[in-house]
Amino acid sequence: MRKYYSSLVFILLIILTNILVSFTDFSLDLTADGKHSISEETIKTLEKVDDIVFIKVYLEGVFPAEFKHLHSEVLNLLSSFKTIADDNLEFEFINPNEGRNEKEKVDLYKQLVKQGLAPTDIEIRKAGSSINQIIFPGAIIYYKDKEIAVNFLKNSVTKNAGENINASVENLEFEFISAIYHISKTKTHRIAFLEGNGELSASEVYDITESVMQDNDKLSYHYTIDRFNIKEFEIDSNTLQADISSQVKKLTSYKAIIIAKPTIAFNMLDKFIIDQYLMNGGKILWLIDGAKASMDSLQQNKSFIATNNDLKLSDQLFKYGIRINANLIEDLRSTEIPIVTGYSNNIPQQSYFPWPYYPLLFSENNHPISKGLDAIKCDFASSIDTIKNNINKTILLHSSKQSRISPTPAKVSLGILENPPPLTSFNKENLTIAVLLEGEFESVFKNRILPKNQKLNFVNQSKKTQMIVVSDGDLIRNSVSNNGDIYPLGYDRFIKYTYLGNKKFIMNSIHFLCDETGLTQLKAKEIKLRLLDKEKIKNNKTFIQLINILLPLIILLIFAFIFTKMKKKKYA
């Protein structure tokens, strides 16, 4: 009787333990890269949601192994989200190709594209044959009367299919949570493009602000965008002078400002206003050319002289911790330009040659701004030096390991293609082109005489803030044709290709500067791609097969032998 009583108690304990565990959310992530851990920023964002977030995931069906992995990771992530948000988050997986005739499929495809999902074509193999199928690896998030599209797939020309899927998995948490944060937030930050010193026009930054493709990959989708003329002042009725204090106050209403490729030198008042904007916690994205150089100068002549682009900002930027040098970077890793090499029946014949003044950048940094970016196209970039001070500096973009510097005045000539310099002259590596500065900045006007007759609330030390400095103003500029047609940012008119990294870098930079919740830190999450060594498998194929077939049988026989011996010993 005691024997049965003990068994009954044991069974009851197991049942009770299961009941208690069912009411407890407990998980332990033992992976080295923390792939199953949910960040604090994600938890805070989901807990703030005050209505139901409904997510339709269009990633269901028969897929190749890579997409099965992506499907599994999305399911696991959303299940974790639901545990945190409880009744405020629901999701479902939908197969857009199932149970629909061709017309219904086409109509649904058009609707999903209109909503912002990007289709992709995959090959599915069945019974020795293969078919191509259109899928939509993404989701539509609905919240109250709003909706937003999330595309999972990250395609980089420098990565294979497995690496692209892995990059997509790394970004899942960021993509979902940033979309939920965006769709549920009640306040929209204001940012401004600065005007007054020959900066890029509205049409030259149209793609980054409004998007040529008419999609949501644009600043205006996330922020209220203005153009702020730093030279247009209110007049103080008492002094009848320009009201500097009011100008600073108006500028500080913006979360971030963008100074895009100025061509006219800044005067002291311009610099003072920008300085006080920074001292009051403002964020700045500088895109400044170190040298005056343009391909337009080669249209009529085969050469021109690049000169120093003296914008009178050197002392200010030096005080903040960087120096944009008056030089041009030449890089063996570059884009190509067409050159007429001959004529056939009076028709010019062109060949493409690498143009070292157009460096092609690939991100190797794990920082959220530049991590995982596709190629970035530069036009006549200069090098940046960092100055030792109390400001933290992070290099975001740099040239390749085979670069060199041409100090201004520098002759830029097509002759470099006919008579290329020796490869050994490209002996500089990783020349800085973009840098992030973070910390408490000291005013460049500290201990200087301030403007008279002004009621200025001068600040000589900023609170903790950030700025990003890029030594190529063209990195944000989209091309505009003579008849007004606007091309996508990063578009190379010579090879008819768009370098997507340009736009992504600018978007990431602004998101980082305007991020109050730390969501951009989720982009730094790294999941290691643990691929099988195909060469090792091929060389040890027979051994691996024997291990997988014989080892389980041997273990089973050992246990059977031990069990038989113990049974004989007990009943002998």
Image (cartoon, helix red, strand yellow):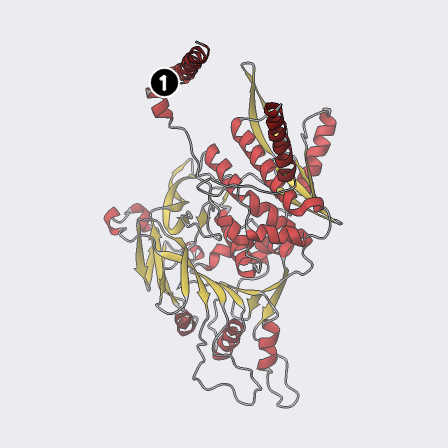
> 450 and 464: which one is in front?
464
Number of on-image labels: 1
- Asked if 499 appears above or below 308 in the picture, the reply is above
Q: Residues within 10 Å of mark 1 (few under 14, many from 20)?
A: few
Residue 70, quarter of picture: top right
> 350 and 115: which one is in front?
115
Which quarter of the rendered picture does the C terminus lie within?
top left
> 557 and 505: which one is in front?
557
- Asked if 14 appears above or below 404 in the picture, the reply is above
On the picture, is 122 further left or further right than 320?
right
Residue at the right extreme of this rendering: 145
- The image position of residue 226, as x and y in percent, is 63, 64
The answer to whether any part of residue 384 appears in the image is yes
In the picture of the structure, the residue carrying the numbered disc 1 is 541
At 42% from the left and 35% from the top, the residue drawn is: 345
- The image position of residue 546, as x and y in percent, is 37, 15
**Residue type, label 1:** Lys
